Amino acid sequence: KIEKEEEQLSYDDSEKKIYHLCIVNLVIGTLYCAKGNYEFGISRVIKSLEPYNKKLGTDTWYYAKRCFLSLIENMAKHMIMMKDQVVQECIQFLECCEMYGKDVKALIEQPLEAEPMHPGKNTVTYEARLLKSLLLQLI
């Protein structure tokens, strides 16, 4: 039902960013990842951000990367093994985030921070490349 309503809204105003279904899928994916079902959880997180040009933002990236960090941590500890197909989906997703995340800040800078963050490192593109490199080191 949410999907149909979002489609209708996107037909009415194609430039408007709508996050309802994105948030629902992010929550579901995060919960599955927290319970250890990374295969389904990560696929749900990836699905939640499609299309990337409309759904990839600072807030959505914040929660999506948490799932990937948890996956990478558990793979590094040899607590879980992922199918090659799932790893390839993750790499493809991170490559798409590299493409669409050039102008998306990874963190909202704090005004009272003593040392400002380097602008090149505060992008989704930078963090996606970092996650991709960590993932590639594990396989």
Image: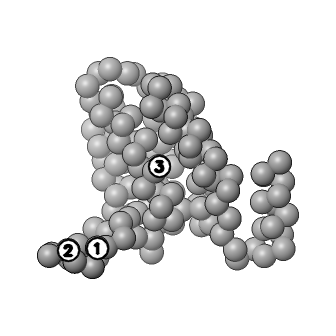
In the picture provided, is 51 more to the left or to the right than 126? right
Seen at 70% across and 76% down, the residue is 15
Label 3 or label 1, whichever comes before in sequence order = 3
Q: CA distance from mark 1 to mark 2?
A: 5 Å
Q: From the image, tell me which residue sits under label 2.
A: 113
| Tags 1 and 2 touching, CB below 8 Å | yes
For the residues labelled 3 and 1, the Cα–Cα distance comes to 21 Å
> Badge 3 local density, few (<14 within 10 Å), some, or many (20+)?
many
Which callout, 3 or 2, points to the residue nearer the camera?
A: 2
Q: Nearer the viewer, mark 3 or mark 1?
A: 1
Question: The C terminus is located in which quarter?
Answer: top left
Residue 110 numbered mark, or none: 1
Q: How many labels were placed on the picture?
A: 3
- Tell whether 134 sits left or right of 21: left
Three-letter residue code for mark 2: Glu
Nearer to us in this view, 88 or 64: 64
Q: Position of residue 33 (x, y in %)?
A: 47, 32
Q: Is residue 123 visible?
A: no
Q: Which residue is mark 3?
A: 64
What SS does tag 2 mark?
loop
Q: Residue at x 30, y 34 (%)?
A: 73
Q: Position of residue 55 (x, y in %)?
A: 59, 61
Rounded to the nearest angstrom, the CA distance separating label 3 from label 2 is: 25 Å
Disc 1 marks a residue whose amino acid type is Gln
Q: Helix, strand, or loop for circle 3?
A: helix
Q: Is residue 122 left or right of residue 8?
A: left
